[in-house]
Image (cartoon, rainbow, N blue to C red):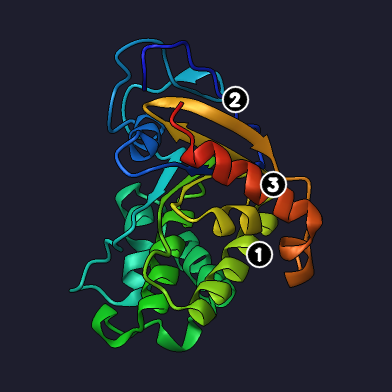
Amino acid sequence: MGARNQNLRIESGEFVCVIGPSGHGKSTLLNMIAGFTSPTAGSIQVAGRPVTKPGPDRGVVFQRDTLFLWKRVDENIEFGLKAQGVPKAERTKIVSELLKVTGLQAFAKAWPKQLSGGMRRRVAIAAVLANKPDVLLMDEPFAGLDYLRLSQMHSFLLDLWQESGHRAVVMVTHDVDEAISLADRVVLVKNGTIALNKRVDLPRPRTASDITGDQANELRAELLRAFESEN
């Protein structure tokens, strides 16, 4: 991040969207939380513990899914659990639950190449959630989806997040409307600094009228002004 002192606190169970121009530090912030990149000054902490490397308490969903093409859907979801030495019976139970939640029971034995883009993203999210991370980190996971698929994935993600209860979500997006639809709070990153940290005081679940009403439009205008300003 930039040279100025930066402080950002994300509460347990909070959904935060990070927006900002390309190349200004959104993904860098996410990578520091994930433990892929070390800050040049200061520290990143999760649950009071300094982040020095990747860990199972932080799950990452990338813009491009990272499914193993040679593994079936259920094997992809199970992979992290198996690597951790989770007993077979428990792995089977967790995978079964996630297949049900994601609506993928009928595709448990399908290969990734047989799935649509939206289904592949559901598998990728399920594979991360199988490890029950305290923090779910997402780097533009829905980029390129058409409106209908995007709406479906938003509903899917919000349902999973609300069911988890305590899991924090930090999601990078370039889309202000997506941030307003999903987030409890929107953080604008510009020039490597936190330029705006704004709470989204809209009800949940959010209807089309909620995210196009006067309150949402005022927030949208404020975010766009800050996004477009030279400072």
Query: In the visual, does 64 lie left or right of 170?
Result: left
Among the two numbered marks 1 and 2 on one chain, the one whose residue lies closer to the N terminus:
2
Q: Name above or below for residue 100 compared with residue 174.
A: below
Q: Amino acid at mark 2?
A: Arg
Q: Residue shown at 40%/23% (left/top)? A: 51
Q: Secondary structure at mark 1?
A: helix
Which labelled disc corresponds to residue 9? 2
Spatial separation of the CA atoms under disc 3 and disc 1: 24 Å
Q: Quarter of the image holding residue 61?
A: bottom left
Horizontal and vertical percent for residue 168?
59, 42
Horizontal and vertical percent for residue 211?
72, 62
Q: Which residue is mark 3?
A: 219
Q: Which residue is mark 1?
A: 159
Horizontal and vertical percent for residue 191?
37, 28
Asked if the residue at tag 1 contacts the one at tag 3, i.e. Cβ–Cβ closer than 8 Å, the answer is no
Q: Residue shown at 40%/69% (left/top)? A: 121
Q: Quarter of the image holding residue 63?
A: bottom left
Which one is closest to the eye, mark 3 or mark 1? Answer: 3
Pointer 3 local density, CA inside 10 Å: few below 14, some 14–19, many at least 20: some
Q: Amino acid at mark 3?
A: Leu
Spatial separation of the CA atoms under disc 3 and disc 2: 21 Å
Spatial separation of the CA atoms under disc 1 and disc 2: 24 Å
Q: Secondary structure at mark 3?
A: helix
Q: Amino acid at mark 1?
A: Asp
Viewport quadrant of the N terminus: top left
Of 145 and 117, which appears nearest the observer? 145
Q: Secondary structure at mark 2?
A: loop
Q: Name above or below for residue 98 compared with residue 131.
A: below
Can residue 82 be seen in the rendering of this structure?
A: yes
As drawn, which residue projects farthest toward the front?
Answer: 230
